Amino acid sequence: MPWLEENLMTVIILAVVAWMVWGRIVQPKLLGIKKITADKYKGFKDEPHTLVDVRSIGEWRGGRASNAIHIPLDEVRSRMTRIPKDKPVVLICASGMRSGMAATMLAKAGYSSVYNFSGGMGSWCAAKLPTKS
């Protein structure tokens, strides 16, 4: 046990890093969640799908993708039935973090075609995709 006592902080740091890698990279891939960039979305946007914005109400009111529905991240579990399962779902937030969490929730709930929009609304606006305020 002396080794563990001497290296406890290193073990804790490695455990936290492993947990973060699992949650951000490994688990989404195992669940079949795909990333979609603004450029790829431009070719995808005319296909039937549901775009879900998981940002807060204040962020939503400040400007949004014109074809998005709004379900804040903390309401995704309770309002999941509003999201059709029969077509792809694209999730978007400000940066891709919250939409990644929402994508994981949907994939675990049985949604089979789930996309996380890379770069969030910043990438959406930079690509000049349609918005409204």
Image (cartoon, helix red, strand yellow):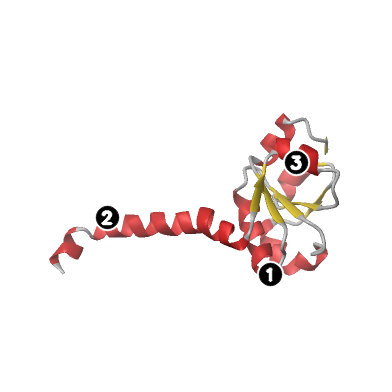
Q: Secondary structure at mark 2?
A: helix
Pointer 2 and pointer 3: residues touching (CB < 8 Å)?
no
Sort mark 3 into few (<14), some (14-19) or many (20+) by Cα contacts within 10 Å. some
Find disc 1 in the rendering and name its residue.
109
Residue 86 falls left or right of residue 120:
right
Identify the mark at residue 10; answer none if there is no mark: 2
Which amino acid, by three-letter code, is at mark 2?
A: Thr
Q: Amino acid at mark 1?
A: Ala
Residue 125 percent coordinates (x, y): 73, 33
Quadrant location of residue 1?
bottom left
Q: Secondary structure at mark 3?
A: helix
Neighbourhood count class around disc 1 (C-alpha, 10 Å): few under 14, some 14–19, many 20 upward = few
How crowded pointer 2 is (Cα within 10 Å; few <14, some 14-19, many 20+) is rated as few
**Residue 64 in view:** no
Nearest-to-viewer mark from 2 and 3: 3
Q: CA distance from mark 2 to mark 3?
A: 41 Å
Query: Disc 3 or 1, which lies upstream in sequence?
Result: 3
Which is closer to the viewer, label 1 or label 2?
1
**With 3 as the anchor, is 17 left or right in this view?**
right
In this figure, which residue is indicated by the disc labeled 3? 41
